Image: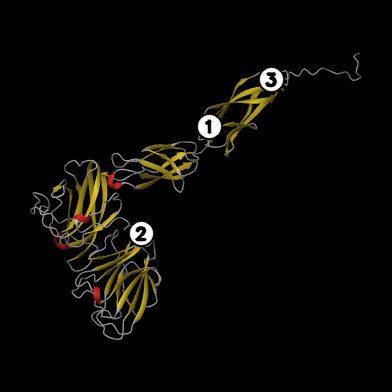
Amino acid sequence: MLKFLLYLFAPAFMCLMPSFMNAQNYEMDLVDGQVINTCSGTFYDSRIGTSDYFNNEDYMVTFCSGSSDFLRFIINPAQVSYGYAIAAGDTLRAYDGTGTSGTLLATYTSANDPGSNSIVLYSTSSCITFHWTSDAAGDADGWEIAIECVPAGCGLNPAAADNFADAPFVCDFSGFCGTTQGYTADLPFNFTGGGSCPVLFGGTIENNSWVQFEAAGPNISFQVDVIGCYGGFGGYDPTPSPVSYGIQGAILSFDGSTFTRVSDCSLSDGQNLSFNLTNTSPLTVGGTYYLVIDGSSGSICDYTINVSGDASVVDAGNDQVICSGASATLTATGPTGATYEWTELGGAVVGTGSSLSVSPTTTTQYIVEETSGGVCSSQTDTVSITVNSCGCSIDLIAAGAQTPCNLSDNTYTQEVTVTYTNAPSTGTLDINGQSFAISSSPQTVTLTGLNSDGNTVNVSASFSDNPTCTLSALNLFTAPASCSTTPCTPDNGTWD
């Protein structure tokens, strides 16, 4: 299912600093009907600059990333006072994919001019199509739209909220992308402190973003990295400096009326582009906390978050490699008191619990789902168990006990001990045409029904499910002499 998000000021998600290498201008009338692969550049109406576009225009162009990356478009990136200038009756439409058969993502007309703000169009697709039409009456200056790319998958996390009351729960901060967007007044009133943050938070709230999380343990640390800013300082800056931009952050608890800061204060000075935010008092396991990232003095910055410590995230552990026939232990971690259910990818449930032993015969992916554990329930994670043959080898064949010749049928039995490494987990151990269930090395088996003829015996051993894993031992033992009791018969039927 295709998704799209449309935000004033900034996109909700941005995971990669846009590339401006080989950026170029794309004028609507000159690229009409084209499919253009690009991750940078500027998209204009039919007359770049302040000249008005023409009446009775009908143009269409498709922009694609040319890769798995998604596209985003910043409309009015320089935040000029008039926003985009589209006359009444004229329309710029944006569709997901190539052509106009895809989802209609946005419609831009004179009715939704952003003024001096930016509008950002973002879609989880590698292509977006614009269709422009102008009528016969009236024209205007048109638009300027910056083109950027976002890695596929970034943007699947919930959008950080502008107001703490709307902050979403984030149960997995891996690759989290956010932005300091919009303005919210300083509520509750105890939120801000002085410039050096003597009480709660340095300075005032300008452009901020909020998320909630559940503590799975007493300690947590957030690594916050700015990857681009735009806003009150003249458009988008892919290499921002704290001289012009800054963000500040804090971890807070909230009792319904009052915030309490539980993290460093020194990071709330508004002059940071990257920082580590760590709790300074123990978190309550299972407690809900807020993470706020604020753009200082109106800074609108894209950022990413990585977390270490006790976040309530279900984790299936590291991928493992085992040898054929061996077992692996699946281990899940997450919030205190959580329960877990394990399934094979595309298969049935294989067990429950935080720890589970499995013995896959082929490489298998296992999915663990957290079936309880507070606000972060129903999370999943995947782990892969790779099964290798690990160089199966039969290392030694040794002779054991031998029975005497059996008078009734002139046969005997012989014990043979086989020492091997990394045997297959299926099939049989085959020795001189006789098959045995595989147990463990060294394995002793008994060959039966062997002919007593007094000759030396060669022995070959192999595995049915890995016949290349084999070994032969020449003249391993000697068969007992024949003990046949068949009487002699004279040629003419009588004895001389």
Residue at the front extreme of this rendering: 256
The CA span between labels 2 and 1 is 47 Å
Residue 480: mark in rendering = 3
Q: Which comes sooner in the sequence, label 2 or label 1? A: 2
Mark 1 lies on a secondary structure that is strand
Indicate whether 7 appears above or below 142.
above
> Residue 246 sits in which quadrant?
bottom left
Alpha-carbon neighbours of circle 3 within 10 Å: few (<14), some, or many (≥20)? many
Indicate whether 164 appears above or below 139.
above
Give, as a three-letter code, the residue at label 3: Pro
Q: Nearer the viewer, residue 68 or 189?
A: 189
Q: Which comes sooner in the sequence, label 3 or label 1? A: 1
- Callouts 3 and 2 close, C-beta under 8 Å: no
427 sits to left or right of 155 = right
Identity of the residue drawn at 46% across and 49% down = 346
The CA span between labels 3 and 2 is 74 Å
Relative image position of residue 245 (x, y in whole percent): 17, 61
Residue 420: mark in rendering = 1
Give, as a three-letter code, the residue at label 1: Tyr
Residue at the bottom extreme of this rendering: 136
57 sits to left or right of 448 = left
Residue at the top extreme of this rendering: 496
Q: Which comes sooner in the sequence, label 3 or label 2? A: 2
220 sits to left or right of 31 = left
